[in-house]
Image: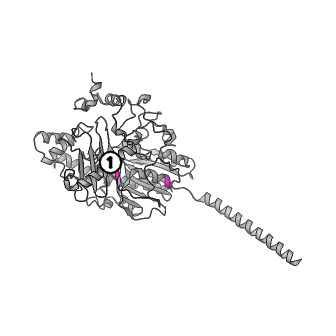
Amino acid sequence: MKKQYSYLAFRILCILMLTATFTACSQKEKLTKQTIKKPNILWVVAEDLSPFMGVYGDSINKGHTPVIDKLAAEGVLFKRAYATAPVCSASRSAFITGVYQTTTGTHNHRSNRFTENEIVPDNLKIKLPEGMKTIPELMKEAGYFTFNSGKDDYNFDYDRRAMYDTGTKENYKAGMNGWQGNFAINYKTVKEYVWNARKDKNQPWFGQVEIMGGKKDYQYVREGEKLETYDVPMPTYFPDIKSQREAWTQHYNANRGSDVTLEKIIKQLKADGEYENTIIFFFSDHGSNASLRHKQFCYEGGLLVPLIIKGNNPALKAGTVRNDLVSLLDVSATTLALGDAKMPSYLVGQDLFSKKYKEKEYVIGARDRCDYTIDRIRSVVSEDYRYIRNYFPNRPMLQASYRDNKKIVTDLRELHEEGKLTPYQDKFWFGVRPTEELYDLKKDPDQMNNLALDPTFSKVLKEHRDVLENWIKETGDKGQFPESAAQLKATYDMWKDRPRFKNAKINPEYDQFKK
């Protein structure tokens, strides 16, 4: 009898212990769900900024980009990150979807556009493939508050209200021109535009903050640190004249100024108590706009961008420097992964911190129509080489463009007419372009010695050519096909009354619209 009671007591004790354990585990799980918060994720996107920074080994700006350098020291620095296009709208259309702009048909700069302040008609709308969603939409589905304190500049038809929770009332019409929101963050009133706009302060947020980078940040250089015109040596592919020196030096100053604007954003994050739980991505949409050889072209200067990722996450080990080839499409995938959001199968990039991450052998870059200038350039970068394919070699580097009235262009044309350029400069800027270019990036960082015709490099040339041809087929590169007559007509109408367009020798594709 006593044994029966003892056994019964033992069973009751076990049940009570199991119940207590289960209750404790449930409470712990509930508490964990309440206390563990998803990280905020902030994209600080600089306009037109090449990495002329101390942390990237630039000797001139060493010690003059301290905030950027500190961000890298506390996070992960990517030395070889590349945009998919050397111009803003095409590049942004890619990283906001995580898919090449050439695949989605958003490769032509400022397409899906119409007359200012008018809704794009149906025959000009570029629709994303069925089922494809933008990164902000996927982050919203994962519970994030989203915002973009800056321009969108996307080349496809979209509803801004489906992407962002704030800033949708300003300059907004559904389907209007792909250029919505504020142009760039107002640093004096940063709170009004970003994370503090959400009603639930416990809700995680994903945001894009625009800084002016190469376009205007040279205005914000710290006192006593501004470089003067002749403080910076020039690459020899430019003539050594004042206008070229001013443009080149301006970009060094822009890097110093971007450091100042980044500092203001970080200070605001800290003041609002948001810094510790925020993962910061610092990158640019493409390279320098100050250089004629960078923006809009597929050399290193047009496609190589800064990329630093910093945050309170075990995967983001402080002081990590990565030299593997990275695409901005990886930023898209990594953002979704860090936010525990859905990872669609169509994503091209990878989570940079996944255990399954595979280093790339090649990264592709593409340039198509820019404003009204029609061109098609494709590029492959590998560990040691950059390969470039020019599909319109008879259209010179200095063909008509939006920069035609700038001194850097007018002075270059004047020197050409006077016969004062070096043979290399004259041929490069005004001659027939080679169909193929190949450069050894380690021995020739300025990419001036084209190895494409050197039989010694025929195997390397074929390797990169084959990579490009396979990529074109596999990704369905829409640059293979002419732009629609309707979109060309819309582009022509947007530019036809502007003097720099009327007086330029423009591409023959527009002849069909002339009276």
Q: Position of residue 107 (x, y in %)?
A: 36, 40
Q: Is residue 431 left or right of residue 157?
A: left
Q: Please tell me which residue lies in front, 483 or 93.
A: 483
Q: Secondary structure at mark 1?
A: helix
**Residue nearest the observer in this picture, 493 or 184:** 493
User: Which x, y percent locates residue 322?
Assistant: 37, 61
Residue 421 lies left or right of residue 325; in this view the side is: left
Which quadrant is the C terminus positioned in?
A: top left
Q: Is residue 345 magenta?
A: yes
Q: Residue at x 21, y 43 (%)?
A: 433
| Drawn side of residue 175 relative to residue 443, left or right | right
Please rate how many residues cluster around mark 1, counting C-alpha atoms within 10 Å: few if below 14, some from 14 to 19, many from 20: many
Instruction: Tell me the quadrant of the picture where the N terminus can be found.
Output: bottom right
Q: Is residue 219 visible?
A: no
Which residues lie in the magenta part? 336-364
Residue at the extreme bottom: 2
Q: Which is more toward the observer, 77 or 387?
A: 387
Residue drawn at x 67%, y 62% as measured from the top left: 27
Answer whether residue 30 is visible to the viewer in this image: yes
Query: What's the amino acid at mark 1?
Result: Leu
**Residue carrying label 1:** 468
Residue 363 percent location from the top left of the image = 35, 52
Q: Is residue 138 magenta?
A: no
Whether residue 423 sits left or right of residue 63 in the image: it is: left
| Label total for image | 1
| Snapshot quadrant of residue 501 | top left
Q: Nearer the viewer, residue 430 or 39?
A: 430
Q: Main secondary structure of the magenta part?
A: loop
